[in-house]
Image (cartoon, rainbow, N blue to C red):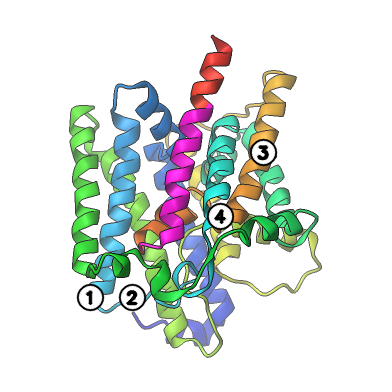
Amino acid sequence: MNLLTLMETVGESQTLALGGLLIGLCFGYLAQRSRFCLRSAVIETCHGPLGGKLAIWLLAFGAAITLTQLFILAGLLDVRSARQLATRGTLSGALVGGLLFGSGMILARGCASRLLILAGTGNLRSLLSGLVFAVVAQASLGGVLAPLRLAISDWWTIDGGDARDLLVWFHASHGIGLAFGLAWLAGGLAFAWRARLGPWPALAGAACGAMVACAWLFNYQVSAQAFELVPVKSLSFTGPAADMLMLVLSPPGKPWNFDIGLVPGVALGAFLGGLKGRELKLEGFKDGLSMRRYLVGAACMGLGGMLAGGCAVGAGVSGAAVFALTAWITLFAIWGAAAATDYLMDRQTT
């Protein structure tokens, strides 16, 4: 992939933003059409029967791992400099952040990416919750909640490099990583067949995961050819949501990057998906109780996402696809906390 011509024509920052916009647009459209949602997968796993919602998530997860590892094996991608692997990490942040995010995801009826997708189709509940999520994320990054985040993060840290790479931990090659991804993909296909899921929803779900791998590939290729330092990253929505908030509130002139293009791209893709399916509809809160629940959940996700270094997509799929230890801890914590919160809320309702 040679991006030099494009970077020389429009500039490196603009190329990154354009790539984020296009990949985000595809992800938003595919996620809206396939109903890709970690919360739905968790609830279906807890209540049963296991079927289409879990299948979609497994297909996306398996495709993300498979394609990312395939790019690495082909020599097209090198993720050793990615933040999830190279920098010093926090195991306590991954665990506590994942627990907070999982609980907040149930309360807000969707993870960070799902809120953005629903907002793109006219869901005002998700729009307001997404704004609260972005505000709390920014406050956790460099505002009033930053000392709390730093204190929790310092409880238990881990060195960067091989210490954060699960493939190194288990003396496994990227070929083993590829086989691991194919196993998850096969599991998704089995559940899709069992649920009699049509070929197009299944394909769209797998394509959501492919966008994670494409984002890794795009950012690496730009970083390899750019004059200035470009971070190697993939899809995530905690940091980008905070960046978009500051872009709107700050004076003009803030440099563009991949994340600046990603957020509006996902919203636009979701809008186009809703338009295609005739699902555009303005929706608000039912009552004050549900409003409080959504906002508390969004706040928990904002702090949790910053603690964990990523959301259900950023840590749970993008980070897991490169076998970052902290990402897998976050993913398990999100699943566990979401299942427990769903159980407690069902018990309270009963």
Q: Mark 1 or mark 4, which has the lower sequence index?
A: 1
Residue 250 drawn in magenta: no
Of the residues shown, which amino acid type is indicated by label 4? Ser
Q: CA distance from mark 4 to mark 2?
A: 29 Å
Q: Would you call the spot at circle 2 few (<14 residues within 10 Å), some (14-19), or many (20 or more)?
A: many
- Residue that numbered label 2 is attached to: 77
Q: Are marks 4 and 2 in contact (CB under 8 Å)?
A: no
**Please, what secondary structure does the residue beneath circle 4 have?**
helix
Please tell me which residue lies in front, 69 or 247: 69
- Residue that numbered label 3 is attached to: 129
Q: Would you call the spot at circle 4 few (<14 residues within 10 Å), some (14-19), or many (20 or more)?
A: many
Q: Are marks 4 and 3 in contact (CB under 8 Å)?
A: no
- Residue that numbered label 4 is attached to: 92
Q: CA distance from mark 3 to mark 1?
A: 41 Å
Q: Mark 2 or mark 3, which has the lower sequence index?
A: 2
Q: CA distance from mark 4 to mark 3?
A: 26 Å
